[in-house]
Amino acid sequence: MNWFPRLLMIGLLAMPVPAMAQGLFSPAITVNDKVVTNYEINQRVLLLQLFRTPGNLPELAREQLIDDRLKAQELDRAGLRLSEEALETEMTAFAQRANLGLDQFIAQLASAGIAEATIRDFVGTGAAWREYIRSRYGARVEITEADIDRALGQSAGNGIQIQVLLSEIILPAPEERPEMAAQAAAIANDIAQMTSTAAFSAAAREYSALPTRENGGRLGWLPITNYPPQLRGLILSLDQNAVTAPLPIPNGIALFQMRGVREVTGPAPEFGAIEYAALYLPGGRTEAGLAAAARVRDAADTCDDLYGIAQDMPEEALERITLPPAEIPSDVAIELARLDPGEVSTTLTSADGQTLVFLMLCGRTPVLEGEVDRGAIRNQLRGQRLTGLADALIADLRASATIVTQ
């Protein structure tokens, strides 16, 4: 999926970026004897925005750059250096994930205001750190067949499923109306500080663009695997009644409040693919557009029914798409999370709000036991354990470091 050009097209939503009016290259953070500048923070925020990373991006950029300095110091102590040839290979591979050549990739980054040195530091530090962790801990990590069986749910009865009870808000933030997007960002920042379910429900009723605003944004219990992979960790890290940082999505900002989490006995499928249909109706969320969507909803019980409805419409008016969960656009993935097969969302629009997206979930395809590559599962578990060891090392380095914020 050629996601990178699409990200450039959707632009950067109104997110708070560190003030750069004074001291662009002055120190913002000192990590032991290494400096992180305001410029580096600004560049990392732009990169995270382009990758549609959820959360408080300025804060996340600062934390990532602190970790990068700690990693660089540890790599220096270990005498590990990434050669220019190895860095070029890593950069080329990174660009290929976006279906771009390296020169084209760097040019597209530049058009978004991101310097080549920024992406080289980002990719190079990550690659060198992964190699260091593999060499330091690789011999300690042994994955047994029983580990793989447990991961597949083969040796634990029906397995354990994690379900979450959330409330949701989506604030409209149209890209073509910067003043509205800025106002939405300010409101979202206020909502993110809430610790009361009553306050969040009141905000949902007042501001949310979702149909759930009628009941204060409250959702029922849903498996965590319904949500996009990039959001699961963020959701599960929430304390009771806590709210996520504002999450940028195309033409909007999403927030979730944690009302409960539970484990239930039963199958906990990991979905290999999600199939959905999008019927594009003229009029956006006007009265006429919503009336047309209501007529389609009354006439269509399954995705197959949409073909008959769209037969006299332009060919591009109906798309039926099957993608791995991680590749589904974030706004679509959030809508699909609450749907069962045959259910519909009419929250999204396209073409600067002129087209209403009639979104129907066709089905979710679980990863079946017979289709599972045990070698791939072994590598995944190995990667998870190495990541845990790496996180513990970073925590130790942080604990012993002198970190000063300017």
Image (cartoon, grey):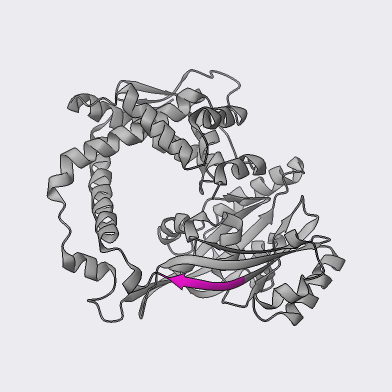
Q: Does 291 sit left or right of 28 as displayed? A: right
Which residue is drawn at the image coordinates 32% and 35% (left, top)? 127
Q: Quadrant of residue 129?
A: top left
Q: Does 304 sit left or right of 150 as displayed? A: right
Give the position of the C terminus as an image quadrant. Answer: top left
Q: Does 392 sit left or right of 111 as displayed? A: left
Name the dominant secondary structure of the magenta segment: strand
Is residue 362 shown in magenta? yes
Q: Quadrant of residue 156?
A: bottom left
Q: Quadrant of residue 369?
A: bottom left
Which residue is drawn at the image coordinates 51% and 49% (left, top)? 54
Is residue 352 shown in magenta? no
Task: Tell me if residue 102 can be seen.
Answer: yes
Which residue is drawn at the image coordinates 25% and 44% (left, top)? 390
Give x and y (percent) for residue 219: 56, 72
Task: Tell me if residue 403 can be seen.
Answer: no
Give x and y (percent) for residue 195: 52, 59
Q: Nearer the viewer, residue 208 or 189?
A: 208
Q: Which residues, given as a range, are shown in magenta?
A: 361-366
